[in-house]
Amino acid sequence: MKKFTLSVATAAFTLASPVTAQSAQEQLDARYDRALAGGYKAMMLCSAIATSERLGGTRSAASIHEWELTGIYPALDPIIRDLPYEIVRYSLEGVETPPLYQVRVDWADDMPARTATQSAVGGCYVGPIGSPLEDAPVLTVENATDNVPGDNWTVNDTALADATKEALGTAAFDGTYGEGSRSTAALVVKDGAIIMERYADGFSAATPQRTWSVAKSIAATFVGVAVEAGDVETDDPIALNYWRQGGSYDVRNQITIDHALRMATGRYSDTPGNRTDPLYWGGSTVNESAIMWPVVHTPGTVYRYANNDTLLAVKAIERYLTFYGPEGVLNRFGMHRTMVETDWSGGFVLSSQVWSTARDLGRLGELYLNDGMYDGERILPEGWRDYVSDPSGPQPEGTQWGYGAGWWTFKRPEGNAFDGIPDDAFAARGNRGQYVVVVPSRNVVIVRRGEDMVGTRFDIAAFTRDVLAALD
């Protein structure tokens, strides 16, 4: 077997000066922020480049700095763009752009670079802080570009008048729906055909972006596939082995898949929204950071939005998902350009770390419009659409939105506060402006992708209302 060597592209940056802090704790926090910023940058560069190249496209480091690495969390934003990095590639004779192996980001003079490594199935995983640097392993494939099937979308250019399409498309990108918002894609599907599609410069139908929390709705879809296969039921206790040892003494054995999908496990989480930075950027694992939190409320009684709950629901179907592979499941309903990332130990980070195209997210919405059917095959249980869009559990406070089982709803138990949007509409929502809106009564799917900076927001409800009004 031939052994390949590294080819390295180095960014011409220098390390930023250490932050002078007033106390030992502030110094520690500043150092931790630099470590997280290094992991964030390594992951974003690695994932954006690797997923694009697997689909036959390209993303430049400059583009990623402009979009994905701008306007992020306030603690990391002043640090991240100036951190020096290396893009490490295999050496392949006769290949102009060899496959990406790893991205390395320097963050401290006395510690190894933070690393993100391309996985065998696409996407990347971030290594633990302090993990040693190693040469690239032997490469067993000659090209990292997959032979991806066509997406088979029908395009209907007559469903909307040209002037209407132009007006909606322009408004989706010019700040009409949120001052300072930054759209990268807008897609409308009606009756199974694309009727409007627009992209920012440098993005296209083949450009994958991180879904952020839209991944939670994809996770709920994976659970539905496992339910249809007879592998689990939503009322099943999750009852992991390390909880079972406590029997009835450990109340976590009462947590069901339904509780986890509805953000109602009753477990403690350390921050509102449960940021899970140690998992996303710090190099910890799902088992380390998401599973062992204690219960502080009776399961099923209190809503608290938490990445950890989605990760727990995925643990319940981990055996099924590992056996068939996320890509094997996604391919069954036409999502050929979607890649599910893992932690370095192989745990699925399906609360956020999925990369997908706008058209693939349109396929996700179409699956729900068709109540779980795709190309004559039942993928999800009959009625799964109604299940995920039913805000029957405890609900979030301080918002007009309701919450179902892994999907947000426009209708809360007390009614619908969104004028012009039908009661049956529901949506997947993610950080930085990722949205998939499903409107079954109108047979419409609306996808909006963005890289909105902290402090800006795209008004997806207003955009949905205007799209539906244009179709009247």
Image: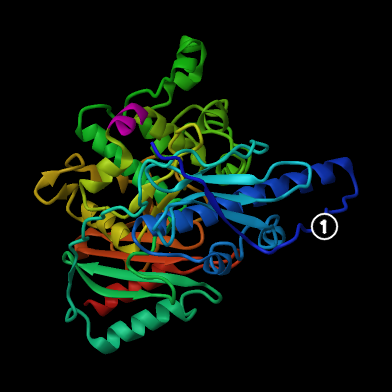
Image check: 95 left or right of 390? right
Image check: 7 left or right of 370? right
Q: Position of residue 139 (x, y in %)?
A: 42, 42
Q: What is the three-letter code of the residue carrying label 1?
A: Ser
Identify the residue shown where x is 16% and y is 66%: 191
463 relative to 43, above or below: below
Q: Is residue 56 visible?
A: yes
Q: Which residue is mark 1?
A: 17
Q: Which residues are magenta?
A: 318-323
Count of numbered labels shown in the rendering? 1
460 relative to 386, above or below: below
Identify the residue shown where x is 61% and y is 65%: 71
Q: Position of residue 208 (x, y in %)?
A: 39, 60
Main secondary structure of the magenta stretch: helix
Q: Where is residue 12, by image quadrant?
A: bottom right
Q: Position of residue 438 (x, y in %)?
A: 29, 59
Q: Is residue 403 visible?
A: no
